[in-house]
Image (tube, rainbow, N blue to C red):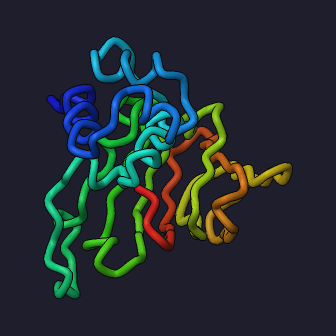
Amino acid sequence: MDFNVGARLRELRQQAGLSQRDLAARAAVPHGLIATIEQNKSSPSVASLRKVLDGLAISFVDFFTPPRPSADKVFFAAGELVDLTSILPGAMQQGAGRMVFRQIGDAHAHHLQILHERYEPGADTGADMLSHHSREGGVVISGTLEVTVGDAVRVLQAGEAYLFDSTQPHRFRNVGDEPCEVVSACTPPYL
């Protein structure tokens, strides 16, 4: 994907009337991180980019501005799901470790994000635990998914599920030898 993360961050920061130092303070990240992202000298982790975007009060979806389907639409063909894969740093790699996230409809209009997720063997949301102001749950459709929420860790098989307060640090990993598919929901939307 030819998306200039640095230019987009600079544009939004300037629209908000913030200096790099102001945004860094609001996001509780080092000033140098903002500068290196804007100069495209580093590719931020999901957790780091989430902190920076929280400092701007903007979601991943709004940052990457994928086209939103009509909020009145009720049914969606498989090809009409919004591909959010490109907004997650590290998710775009090919083969082992790849993650694919496809969203049903306009999550913001409904205040509910429903995702079809696919984790290839070895896929991992990262060593930095995720944490955001939402509640989320999901059902493993196929494969194996290790879910960590705070100090609790469990490997889930097809048919098993999870549900938790997303302010608790959490992480997802495919620890199996086959792809893992999950249908999840999050409110309010996280990505």
Q: As drawn, is 114 to the left or to the right of 82?
A: right
Q: As drawn, is 83 to the left or to the right of 55?
A: left
Residue furthest to the top: 41
Q: Is residue 15 above or below residue 154?
A: above
The residue depicted at 37 percent of the width and 18 percent of the height is 35
Coordinates of residue 139 in the picture (x, y in percent): 58, 69
Residue 133, image quadrant? bottom right
Coordinates of residue 20 in the picture (x, y in percent): 37, 27
Q: Is residue 176 above or below residue 75?
A: above
Residue 121 in sight here: no
Q: Is residue 105 above or below residue 13?
A: below
Coordinates of residue 67 in the picture (x, y in percent): 14, 59
Q: Is residue 120 above or below residue 41?
A: below
The residue depicted at 74 percent of the width and 50 percent of the height is 148
Q: As drawn, is 66 to the left or to the right of 118?
A: left
Quadrant position of the N terminus in the picture: top left
Quadrant position of the C terminus in the picture: bottom left
Coordinates of residue 158 in the picture (x, y in percent): 62, 64
